[in-house]
Amino acid sequence: MKLNRKDILKALETISVAGEGKNMVDSGAVQNVMTFGDEVVVDLVLQTPALHIKKRAEVDVMKAIHEKVYEKAKVKVNIKVQAPEKKKPEIKGKPIPGIKNIIAVASGKGGVGKSTVTANLAVTLSKMGFNVGILDADIYGPSAPIMFDVEAERPLSVNVDGKSKMKPVENYGVKILSIGFFTKPGQAVVWRGPMAAKALNQMIFDADWGELDFMLVDLPPGTGDIHLSIMQSLPITGSVIVSTPQNVALADAKKGVAMFQQESINVPVLGIIENMAYFTPEELPDNKYYIFGKEGARNLAEDLKVPFLGEIPLVQSLRESGDIGRPAALQTATPLETSFEEITRNMVQETVNRNKNLPPTEAIKITTMAGCSAVNKK
């Protein structure tokens, strides 16, 4: 007996795949039907690899053809599993009007120079022509007021559309808000997670940040409540991980990358920065001493398949400039200025790439040049 393809399809319209509402034909599960005399081959595509679902689909197809078309038909069922592509979770958080890119600067371990790097990235971005702000989210160890020489300053209250808001303190072209502005020198901040989160939300949403191309968020070391609160509150554009080259710091930096890459968080990692990469004595400018190990963060970035943004040498003036409240990147024609310019350009480029390939925050068109950068707002 010669089987008819239309009769086969009509029989398959009477059955459905478990878990799907439509019949096999309408749902697209039946990809192809071929007949050769009394032989029939049915190609199915299922969305689940579960063995019992596959077996049931095969039995149902054979039964439908035997009962409704020809009981002695020789039926072969080919099943291919094609799971639907998972939709990436949207980056969470409530956008802040006027702020284009929010970059979280993190480290798995304390003492690797995260806040120093944040301060110098901000200053370098400002020198390149960007509007920049720093949210010092290191609740228990705020250092931005010291590094920007604004310890004695306090945010003023301004009226914006009938609402009272905090005006960030500004120095060196960078707007700053920190819990350090609201505590006395030497006072310990002894807060539980919810209190810290509330204070951060006030600095984020009850502040008049104005127009910013970049907000850098200086996170506390580790992976904890504050990190989760920030990522729930803000649509983070991307994250930057700071580490030193030694194994202890790298192990924690790896955890930091893993935190941002978790499916429930899903914040793009723009890259890793290696601080204290090597020491060069002033009297021996051509010598490099790898005190904490060599190229550890570079190798980690390669292993994790994330960008390596650059390295910062261990230079005494970097520490001194932070202590006196004048970030080292403000100095001109120095190795530190060169390092921070290279790292900042790389970070800007990775932000451009991220904004091209992933959904909001809000993408801005950034053009980078050899020594400076410019922003073309849409």
Image (cartoon, helix red, strand yellow):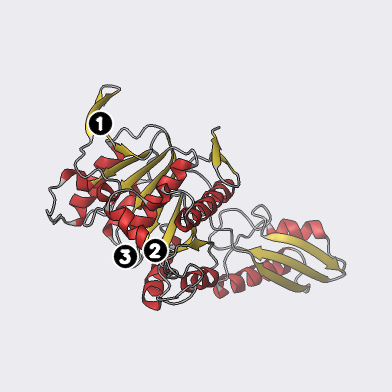
> Residue sitting at 68 percent across and 70 percent down?
79
The reply, left or right, for residue 368 in relation to residue 313 is right
Q: Residue at x 44, y 69 (%)?
A: 277
The answer to which of 364 and 183 lies nearer the viewer is 183
Q: Is residue 95 above or below residue 344?
A: above
Q: Amino acid at mark 2?
A: Val
The spot of residue 176 in percent (x, y) is 31, 42
Helix, strand or loop under label 3: loop
Residue 228 visible (yes or no): no
Q: From this viewpoint, is residue 291 visible? A: yes
Disc with the residue nearer the chain's start (3 vs 1): 1
Earlier in the chain: of badge 2 and badge 1, it is: 1
Locate residue 127, reporting x and y percent.
46, 42
With respect to residue 180, does 276 lie above or below? Answer: below
Residue hosting label 3 = 222
Among numbered discs 3 and 2, the one appearing first in the sequence: 3
The residue located at (37%, 72%) in the rendering is 249
Question: Which amino acid does the dot numbered 1 rest on?
Answer: Lys
Point out residue 244 in the picture as x, y percentages from the top left corner: 40, 69
Residue ID for mark 1: 165
User: Crowding near pointer 2: few (<14 within 10 Å), some, many (20+)?
Assistant: some
Nearest the eye: 364 or 244? 244
Relative placement, left or right, of 129 versus 187 is: right
Q: Which residue is mark 2?
A: 315
